[in-house]
Image: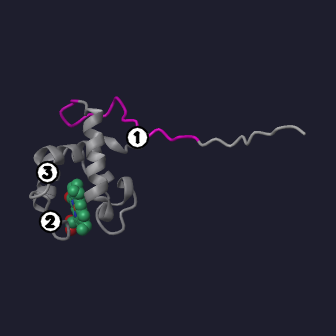
């Protein structure tokens, strides 16, 4: 009787490899660590409303469509909130908000 090793192996999906082309509006590339930090913060604080990994928000805005040149509007909205968007200024430091920005701009870009 021949031994038949079960051949199924799972393909580990490499998590979000940030493209080297990812840049902020000033042309400065985001550090992968910054994008990673933003991704973790997003999961904790934002995805319940804005959708897992930026996709398919049920009722909040689709952040994939947020204008990438509008960093100031992002920081303001996240810090102070707007209508049903809660303010985060008490909880998140400017560094955290910039990490979120890096994630929104560069973290889940369609190829
Ligand atoms: C309680 C649900 C909820 C959570 C949690 C939430 N948001 Fe929002 N967010 C909204 C809603 C609703 C809007 C649309 C507000 C409007 O324009 O009426 C919005 C809008 C925004 C906008 C503005 C989009 C635009 O086009 O101007 C940004 C940026 C944003 N959210 C980022 C975030 C980030 C970053 C987090 C996590 C720190 C977060 N949101 C967490 C509900 C939420």
**Residue at coordinates 26% horizontally, 32% vertically from top-left?**
31
Give the tally of numbered discs.
3
Precedes in sequence: disc 2 or disc 1 = 1
Q: Which residue is mark 3?
A: 75
Does the residue tagged 2 have its C-beta within 8 Å of any atom of ligand 1? yes
Would residue 9 be found to the left or right of residue 104 on screen? right
Q: Quadrant of residue 46?
A: bottom left
Does the residue tagged 1 have its C-beta within 8 Å of any atom of ligand 1? no
Where's residue 61, x and y in %? 29, 62
Precedes in sequence: disc 3 or disc 1 = 1
Secondary structure beneath label 1: loop
Secondary structure beneath label 3: helix
Where's residue 47, x and y in %? 32, 59
Q: Which mark is residue 82?
A: 2
Where's residue 18, x and y in %? 36, 35
Precedes in sequence: disc 2 or disc 3 = 3
The residue sitting at the right extreme is 1
Q: Which residue is mark 1?
A: 16
Q: Quadrant of residue 105?
A: top left
Does the residue tagged 3 have its C-beta within 8 Å of any atom of ligand 1? no
Q: Residues within 10 Å of mark 3 (few under 14, many from 20)?
A: some
Q: Main secondary structure of the magenta part?
A: loop
Q: Quadrant of residue 20?
A: top left
The span from disc 3 to disc 1 (Cα, nearest Å) is 24 Å
**Residue at coordinates 36% horizontally, 60% vertically from top-left?**
51
Stretch of the chain drawn in magenta? 11-28
The span from disc 2 to disc 3 (Cα, nearest Å) is 12 Å
Closest to the observer: 32 or 65? 32
58 w.r.t. 77: above or below: below
């Amino acid at each position: 009787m021949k031994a038949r090793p079960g051949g199924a192996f799972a393909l580990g999906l490499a998590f979000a490899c940030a493209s080297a082309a990812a840049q902020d509006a000033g042309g400065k590339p985001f550090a992968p660590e910054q994008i990673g930090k933003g991704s973790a913060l997003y999961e904790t604080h934002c995805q319940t409303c804005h959708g897992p990994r930026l996709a398919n928000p049920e009722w909040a805005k689709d952040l994939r469509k947020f204008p990438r040149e509008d960093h100031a509007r992002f920081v303001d909205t996240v810090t102070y909130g707007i209508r049903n968007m809660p303010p985060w200024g008490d909880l998140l430091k400017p560094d955290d908000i910039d990490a979120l920005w890096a994630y929104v701009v560069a973290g889940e870009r369609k190829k």
